[in-house]
Image (cartoon, rainbow, N blue to C red):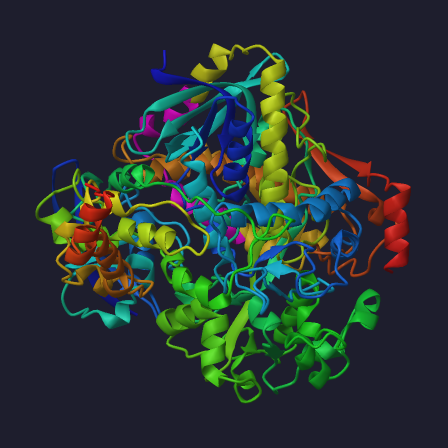
Amino acid sequence: MAEATFRIWRGEKGSGGFRDYRTEVGPGMVVLDAIHEIQATQANDLAVRWNCKAGKCGSCSAEINGSPRLMCMTRLSTLPLDKPVTLEPMRTFPPVKDLVTDVSFNYRAKKKIKPFQPRKPDRPDGTWTIAQQDVERVQEFHKCIECFLCQDVCHVLREHHLYEQFIGPRLFVYTAALEMHPLDTADRVPELRGPDGIGFCNITKCCTKVCPEEIHITDNAIIPLKERVVDRFYDPVKRLFRVFSGSARR
Amino acid sequence: MAEYESYQHDVLVIGAGGAGLRAAIEASAAGVSVGVVSKSLLGKAHTVMAEGGIAAAMANVDDRDNWRVHFADTMRGSQYLSHPRMAQLHAQEAPARVRELEAWGALFDRTPDGRILQRNFGGHRYPRLAHVGDRTGLEMIRTLQDHGIHQGIEFYMEVTVLKLLKDGDRIAGAFGYDRERGRFRMFEAKAVVLATGGLGRAYQITSNSWEYTGDGMALAYEAGAALKDMEFVQFHPTGMIWPPSVRGILVTEAVRGEGGVLKNKDGRRFLFDDVPANYRDQTADNEEEGFRYTQGDKNAKRPPELLTRDHVARCIMREVREGRGSPHGGVFLDIAWIKNRVPGGGEHIKKKLPSMYHQFKQLADIDITEVPMEIGPTIHYAMGGVRVDPDTQMSDVPGLFAAGEVAAGLHGANRLGGNSLSDLLVFGKRAGEYAAAYAKEHNAATANKEEVEAAARHALEPFERAAGEGPYLVQRDLQQVMQNQVGIVRKQGDLQKALEALPALQARAGRVAVEGNREYNPGWHTSVDLGSLLTVSEAIMRCALERKESRGGHFREDYPAKDEEFGKVNLIVSKGADGEMHLSREPVPEMSAELKEIIKEMK
């Protein structure tokens, strides 16, 4: 079996550096397998998050040779192994230790978004009638595994650190799922324009490119939400109408 | 004196998968203060891995379905070792629990008239599984999570519990540590709900993640609760087997529900060769009829691929052992063949099984719409666990409840696919409801501080050993023993050897050393988890030795037939006053006259 070198970020809080580990590479191995092998035999205290090892839980996000990816779904055969494979934590979030970061921002930001509010049930037994095609539109967003790679790669968070003014692509997908939910009745458009900061997104589509679930984050979630904001607040005809009808909104 | 932060709640839920979240939501709705402790981040629990669906007799697709049929199917699948009352409550309440999820935002696939669609699954007589493609578990956990965060529940993520605390006989809380900083945390509570899932990590080839080390079962056992049915471990018949690094990853039963067939290397549908007598009149005797069943023909009988998991797994093992397996030691699962039989061809397969398509494409370079998959049995689920009251889910320890995989009773000797997600919802809700009621009826308990000190000291010992073996090696050796000697095919000699190997493993676990500090140190976490793994492994070994027959998930090569006497008892283990594990037989709970009537009618 061939060997490969893994250049892994080791460190706590802010400080740290890369350390090289060599391990054997077997057929079909993914990056997370190599990490496990190194952890079991060379570095018992190497910190890493993982759960399902099948691309379904979104725990093992990291930057592999500089690209944000899931370690469990990145096969070693797709990486050049003649040079070291570099593994770093997601750089947008505060480091905890080694490959583990503090992703609590995402949980806090989600909690601020208005929860689901269904319309009254359609049937006396408390159920609703929904067409498959109406379900499918939102099901795309429900595929999200909350790996937060889209948040990691978004420059509004990564470069500009606007954590207090911008909820990030993951939570726009979450908001889109609620806004386009066939049963939902709540209105989140004012928040999108305000505290959620959708205006900061300038649709560079970096989030879409890294999504392991291949959700069309920009095209199917963010742009339609931006359109709702524009429709509501910036459409000149509607604005005029609101002035005359006295229904002016802020 | 150990340093720790203290937290107080009326109800403490340990575990944040489907059962834990559902319990927390229910307890919170009853107006008590609720804390949830989870080993991982919120939304990452094993529930996300559930693919096929939630079994609930809603009769949206086939109006012949009702709770009585679901009850009878569950009992038959369990080889009549389920607690009949639990099987009844489960079948009766599952539909309401599914509808509730929809009211909280879950979006299930639909029937043409806009209701929740239901699909076929092994052992279920009618299409019964509410689903979302093949990622139902993700939809379920996310719905519960997104609803739960707005219910005033306090979440403590990445906290592992080391010990349950007691006040005399009753529960008083739990003591644990947080992973990020390695600091101790003390949770005082009037009632505790265990929802920690299973024990798949005791085995080498498993569909379970690092978390599933049998913590809840071991914690309950140490606290004085009895465990039941521990010999029954479910091997899911279809796990990935190639390449080696993906071995064990699950291939959903929905593949077979949608028309996938199992073949040996000669291309033979070997399951037709061996249909158990009690399923013969429900099973198709030709390929064409089986296919029609998967495509919704109500007059067709189901193909033998949809027999119960224990049976399908054993047939696969037989093909492999007798030299008719696939190149990497499994058999072939073929869904690609339906391409020419359904509208939409390959696209239809991708739409029905999107994450399976994705998983094989990415991890194995295989396009399942073109070629068959190679699969073999993988450890999947623990039917056994904490013995609970069927209505309240309370264990033998007053104030200690258990729900979901950690609890025993619903599944007996074999669980039907789809009955797990419904189990989490039905009994998670019940555990939450009764834990809240218990908390309201009782004053605050006082945890025994000496227990806390002892648990803290014990947890830190690995740091004090300057040199010693690392915990991962001990874990690997235990997994090997369990895989090879306590696996899918068991016999006296092997089980005996496994049991004899245990003291040495226990001694090694007591001597492991960890490097580094307490902050986010997986080596330390593994050393702590070893204790639970060893306890549940011993329970499985002892019960497997005792049950000298083959039934459901428990197959004894030396006793290949069912034994009538063993069919009347559940095996119970508990910790004796001498500190040793004690085993006893307990008669299977009596069925009510109504339930007996149903079983007779649906024979």
Q: Residue at x 40, y 50 (%)?
A: A51
**Nearer-the-camera pick, A191 or B463:** A191
Q: Residue at x 62, y 20 (%)?
A: B438
Where is residue A29 shown, x and y percent of the image?
Answer: 33, 65
Where is residue B478 shown, x and y percent of the image?
Answer: 51, 47
| The stretch drawn in magenta includes residue B165 | no
Where is residue B166 shown, x and y percent of the image?
Answer: 56, 16
Magenta-highlighted stretch: main secondary structure? helix
Horizontal side of residue B553 vs B451, given as left or right: right
Where is residue B376 shown, x and y percent of the image?
Answer: 56, 68
**Nearer-the-camera pick, B599 or B28:** B28
| The stretch drawn in magenta includes residue B476 | yes
Kindly indicate the quadrant of the structure image that contains residue A23: bottom left
Q: Residue at x 58, y 70 (%)?
A: B112
Residue that sits furthest to the left in the current view: A160
Position above or below: A53 against B361: above
Looking at the rendering, the stretch of residues picked out in magenta corresponds to B456-480
